[in-house]
Image (tube, rainbow, N blue to C red):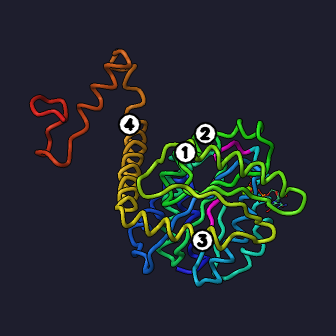
């Protein structure tokens, strides 16, 4: 699959038109497994932390090392922030001119099944098309902490330089899922502020109970603008991958993600089918919403693993 085909396939995946969805499903069914092992890396941090600048420099480093890099930018917030997606494209200009890079912002809102669901599909598409490193940029706010964990093998957290008390406001959730913490912008006049942030985070990390038996998140100072410290980040990621694979956690996390993906798709598909077919059910049946919902699901849904035609809730051996 070349870059143009890949871009077209993603457009179909992101489309809300049912006929596009069918075409997207057909493409998806025909995907082959990636030839190389793949690494999905989340890049998170508050707006302005320097995520896009980091990805522009880090992506180029990875390409120099022989990788093909796909960048997906998730913006969970409203269409109001479209400005930042545009800024992202210009901020990753040098990377985007490389033939071994593919950059795709995910439009926010209006996507059937949510941004995360589509990002999973786009990740698989990119991997099948030969991109072995997927960098997923996400703003560390709201729901996206668990979402980013569910989409990736490892999460990098970019921290902007700030004085100690400003750091108190940083979301705890994202710090807890981060596998590597990076104080960014350690250059020029900002260096002193970065040192302060470093001290605060180093102290906080010491007090945080270890999340996993095989990995303690390292903390670095980097400059995305000047490309400093990026080799260390890649070394850490490789160590992380080795440790995670050795412990079995890597495969466990990917498996868990496939199950979650399946559950999300089932929820979405069921909802779509019920909406299409039973919109007026409550009015017609004169039931309470609770009874109408229970009746509807139990009468219509049968486990594919059990005897055919026996609806769940029909008697013995309920799940
Ligand atoms: N001095 C310095 N400035 C940086 C560095 N990295 C990023 N910046 C600047 O910080 C600003 C924000 O950078 P972005 O890369 O757009 O940050 P972002 O996290 O992607 O921002 P959003 O996508 O809006 O959330 C820009 O003006 C960058 O030039 C760095 O290492 N050093
Ligand atoms: Mg950005």
* 318 versus 192 height, above or below: above
Q: CA distance from mark 4 to mark 3?
A: 47 Å
Ligand 1 falls in quadrant:
bottom right
Instruction: Kindly identify which numbered label has been placed on residue 172.
Output: 2
User: Residue 99: where, in percent of width, then height?
Assistant: 67, 82
Foreground tag (1 vs 4): 1
146 to the left or right of 52: left
Whether residues under marks 4 and 2 lie with C-beta atoms below 8 angstroms apart, the answer is no
Residue at the (38%, 36%) spot, across then down: 274
* 217 versus 237 height, above or below: above
> Observer-nearest residue: 208 or 5?
208
Q: Residues within 10 Å of mark 2 (few under 14, many from 20)?
A: few
Q: Which residues are magenta?
A: 71-79
Whether residues under marks 3 and 1 lie with C-beta atoms below 8 angstroms apart, the answer is no
Residue at disc 2, secondary structure: helix
User: Residue 70: where, in percent of width, then height?
Assistant: 60, 70
> Dividing the image into 4 quarters, which one contains the C terminus?
top left
User: Residue 232: where, in percent of width, then height?
Assistant: 63, 70
Q: Which residue is mark 1?
A: 176
> Observer-nearest residue: 177 or 203?
203
Residue at disc 1, secondary structure: helix
Q: Cβ of disc 1 within 8 Å of ligand 1?
A: no
Q: Which residue is mark 4?
A: 274
Q: CA distance from mark 2 to mark 3?
A: 24 Å
Q: Which is more N-terminal, label 4 or label 1? A: 1
Q: Which residue is mark 3?
A: 234
* 166 versus 182 height, above or below: above
């Amino acid at each position: 699959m070349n870059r143009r085909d890949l871009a077209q396939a993603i457009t179909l995946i992101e489309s809300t038109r049912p006929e596009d969805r069918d075409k997207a499903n057909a493409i998806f069914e025909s995907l082959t497994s990636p030839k190389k092992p793949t690494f999905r890396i989340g890049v998170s941090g508050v707006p302005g932390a320097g995520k896009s600048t980091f990805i522009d420099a880090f992506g180029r480093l990875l390409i120099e090392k022989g990788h093909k890099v796909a960048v997906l930018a998730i913006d969970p917030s409203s269409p109001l922030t479209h400005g930042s997606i545009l800024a992202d494209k210009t901020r990753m200009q040098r990377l985007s001119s490389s033939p071994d890079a593919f950059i795709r912002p995910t439009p926010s809102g209006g996507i059937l099944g949510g941004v995360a669901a589509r990002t999973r599909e786009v990740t698989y598409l990119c991997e099948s098309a030969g991109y072995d490193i997927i960098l997923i940029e996400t703003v560390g706010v709201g729901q996206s902490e668990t979402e980013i964990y569910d989409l990736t093998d490892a999460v990098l957290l970019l921290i902007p330089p700030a004085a100690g008390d400003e750091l108190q406001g940083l979301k705890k959730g994202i710090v807890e899922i981060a596998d590597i913490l990076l104080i960014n912008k350690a250059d020029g006049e900002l260096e002193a502020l970065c040192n302060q942030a470093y001290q605060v985070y180093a102290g906080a990390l010491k007090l945080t109970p270890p999340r996993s038996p095989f990995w303690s998140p390292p903390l670095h100072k980097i400059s995305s603008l000047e490309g400093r410290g990026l080799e260390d980040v890649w070394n850490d990621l490789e160590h992380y991958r080795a440790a995670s694979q050795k412990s079995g956690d890597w495969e466990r996390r990917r498996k868990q993600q496939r199950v979650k993906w399946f559950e999300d798709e089932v929820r979405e598909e069921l909802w779509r089918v019920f909406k299409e077919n039973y919109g007026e059910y409550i009015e017609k049946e004169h039931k309470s919403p609770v009874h109408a919902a229970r009746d509807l699901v139990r009468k219509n849904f049968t486990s594919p693993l059990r005897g055919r035609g026996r609806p769940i809730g029909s008697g013995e051996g309920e799940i």
